[in-house]
Image: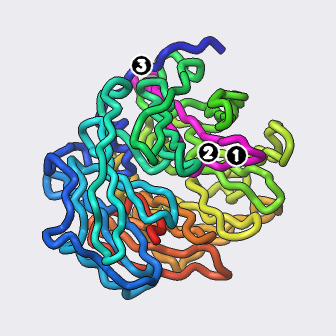
Amino acid sequence: MKHAPPSRAPGYLVSWLLAGSLFLGACGSSDATPPDDGVGPSNDGPLYVLSARITTGSELASFALIVDSLEEGTAVDFGTSIEIANGGIVVGPPGQGVMYAVDGATPELTEFRLQPDGSFAMGETLSFLNFSVTTERVARGNFIFLSDTKVYSIDTFAQLIIIWDPSVMAITGTIDLSEIGIPGEVALVGDGEVIRDGEVVIAIDYLGLGQNGQTGFASESVLLFLDPNTDTITRVLTIENCGSVGSLFLDDRGDIYGASSFAGITTRVVGDRGGPECVFRIPRGTYDVVDQALLSERTGDLIAGSMFRSRDTLAYFRVLDLSLLPSDTATAGEVSAARAWTWGLLDLAQNEPIRLVPELGVNGAVVFGFEIDGETWVAESEEGFTGATLVNVSGQSARRGVFVNALIRNAFRLR
């Protein structure tokens, strides 16, 4: 397969697919700013960050919300939040008392450190200007915190991984990604990287213009294996007949599981190109793709995508109920936003049908997953992205957590 620098797909579709929403503009304040009094919770208990975004018409506003619990009924106070410029996102290493506000329109991020009294001290701003044009396409999966002195920031549009040191807020190197380019396709980073045997594993999808000018995902994805000690690509593994790999997880044995996201479904349902949805496994100590199957073979022909690990080899998937899809649905974004998606639970190690989970209800497709304190939480968006509820899917049965009147794009433990 000949590789070349990717071409750019229409910006509106790329923005929607990467942001996981229909928020197409980038308006807002010019800087990340602390709340008026700069003071948040001051107790010594756990604190969590929710990166939330609100849209009003064509305008976006993003906030870092600080909460002391992820459980249902937790109070959420926008008055003590930190506003993030231009609809950006908040990222950070778990439990380190620091977060980084990533501007949504310029290639900059700003450090905020939690103080003993619960306030935040604004630190330095790091610019990627010499490497990236803008950070408006970033998502949580674009940032991998490896240590106190190393972070990978993945920019597939610039065909680079930018390496930076958060202890001194300086860029220390880059990794060239030009070899993963495919002519006519835009490379997109998936969500939910894993680290196995010292290697960082990242999913890469391809979006572009297909036959007859149709836009959608390619019928293949790749897994990128990186050595963080040498900052080199050790292997590029092509997953054929598998479009839009959106999530990975590592089981207790060290096997990697991967599956397609909902994004390919949304383009295919409206008649655009979309790669087939699949699941696969890579056993520990190998780079062999085994147990690969179309998701439809595992779900009894139900349309499913987006995998979130529950426990052992159990995983939750988003399932599209075509009978609930409005007849006038015409775009991928409308499929994503439609109140036509429910949950299914699948044991990836067993040849048994998917179990639908009607008690979790029906909603839109946009769901982000986060591993927090060893548990998997998902942010399930309300219809129209007017709000989101965190749902813990790690136990014997899922339980609902905190609700926010905004789209939750990231969540992690601050303290």
Say which of marks 1 and 3 sits in front: 3
- Residue 215, quarter of picture: top left
Dividing the picture into quadrants, the one containing residue 26 is: top left
- Residue linked to disc 3: 7
The residue at the point 49 percent across, 74 percent down is 391
Are the residues tagged 1 and 2 within 8 Å (C-beta)?
yes
Report whether 331 appears left or right of 200: left
Residue 255 drawn at (x, y percent): 79, 52
Q: Which mark is residue 277?
A: 2
Residue at the image point whose x is 47% and y is 76% from the top: 361
395 displayed left or right of 386: right
Q: Is any atom of residue 269 visible in this view?
A: no
Could you say where residue 144 lies in the image, as x and y percent from the top left? Answer: 53, 46
| SS category of the residue bearing label 1 | strand
The quadrant in which residue 24 appears is top left
- Is 154 rendered above or below residue 99? above
Going by the numbered disc 1, the residue's amino acid type is Leu
Q: Nearer the viewer, residue 288 or 66?
A: 66
> How many neighbours does mark 2 have within 10 angstroms: few (below 14), some (14-19), or many (20 or more)?
many
Outermost residue to the bottom: 73
Lower sequence index among marks 1 and 2: 2
Q: Position of residue 21 (x, y in %)?
A: 34, 51
Location of the N terminus (image quadrant): top right
| Distance between the alpha carbons at the discs numbered 1 and 3 | 28 Å
Contact (Cβ within 8 Å) of mark 2 with mark 3: no
Number of marks in picture: 3
Query: Magenta span has 209?
Result: yes
Question: Residue 367 lies in magenta, yes or no?
Answer: no
Q: CA distance from mark 2 to mark 3?
A: 24 Å
Residue 343 drawn above or below residue 247: below
Q: Which residue is mark 1?
A: 294
Q: Which residues are magenta?
A: 186-213
